[in-house]
Image: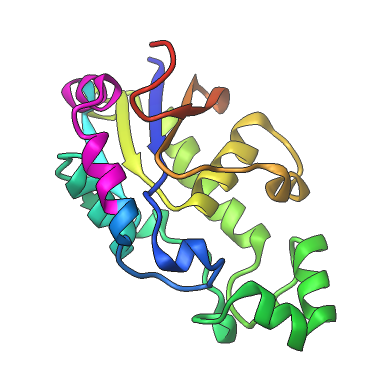
Amino acid sequence: MTTRVTLISPALSTALREARFADGPLDAAGLRQAEAARGAFAVVEQRATADRVFASPSVRCRQTAEALGLVAEPLPELRTCAMGRWRGRRLDEVSADEPQSVAAWLTDPTAVPHGGESLKALHIRLGHWLDALGADARPHSARVLAVAEPDVVRALTVHAIGAPPQVFWRIDVQPLTITELSGRNGRWNLRSGRPLGGGSH
């Protein structure tokens, strides 16, 4: 059985705009955009056919799901990367204070200068989750829809195409876009970057 996983990135929040290592509610513009996309054919189609609907356990993902009319189960496995003592700070602030630490974090997937979770650990965690879905032949696991943090979408994309973890930084996940993974037995196909409610179906 082919497993299909549709990932929707959250709408904009103040923290995302500021490149801040923090959660937080959608800002006014992000909420309007998510609500405007609610009736999009892509969402209606996926909601109608999904066997399970999940969300990263963050405020912005939960609010995006609600604005899209989705009843999503918060899933700990889809949590964003733990940023340790950098949590709450902006990337430019940390870069100014700890340039060598940030350089190591950006180039070495095993580095944990913030004391949180390494990118390698993030990839392993999400790769296990994705492959477990693909190995599960029960009908309820055939189609999964998830509103997921941008770094979660990046890591799942890297795992799906079998790329090295360093590729993580070369993937740009725009707000309210769809990334689709389909596969079985650990082999995945990728379709990414489709705007919510736009493009071909």
Give the residues in magenta. 31-48
Q: In the image, 22: left or right of 156?
A: left
- Main secondary structure found in the magenta portion: helix
Q: Position of residue 146 (x, y in %)?
A: 33, 41
Image quarter hosting the N terminus: top left
Q: Nearer the viewer, residue 89 or 113?
A: 89
Residue occupying image coordinates x 50% and y 62%? 17
Q: Is residue 58 magenta?
A: no
Q: Quadrant of residue 7?
A: top left
Q: Quadrant of residue 143?
A: top left
Q: In the image, 53: left or right of 103?
A: left
In the rendered view, tell whether residue 3 sits above or below residue 20: above
Let me know if residue 176 appears in the view.
yes
Q: Quadrant of residue 61?
A: bottom left
Let me know if residue 74 appears in the view.
no
In the rendered view, tell whether residue 147 sits above or below residue 191: below
In the rendered view, tell whether residue 115 sits above or below residue 29: below
Q: Position of residue 183 (x, y in %)?
A: 49, 20
- In the displayed orientation, state which residue is furthest to the top: 200
Residue occupying image coordinates x 75% and y 71%? 111
Q: Position of residue 18 (x, y in %)?
A: 53, 68
In the rendered view, tell whether residue 119 sits above or below residue 99: above
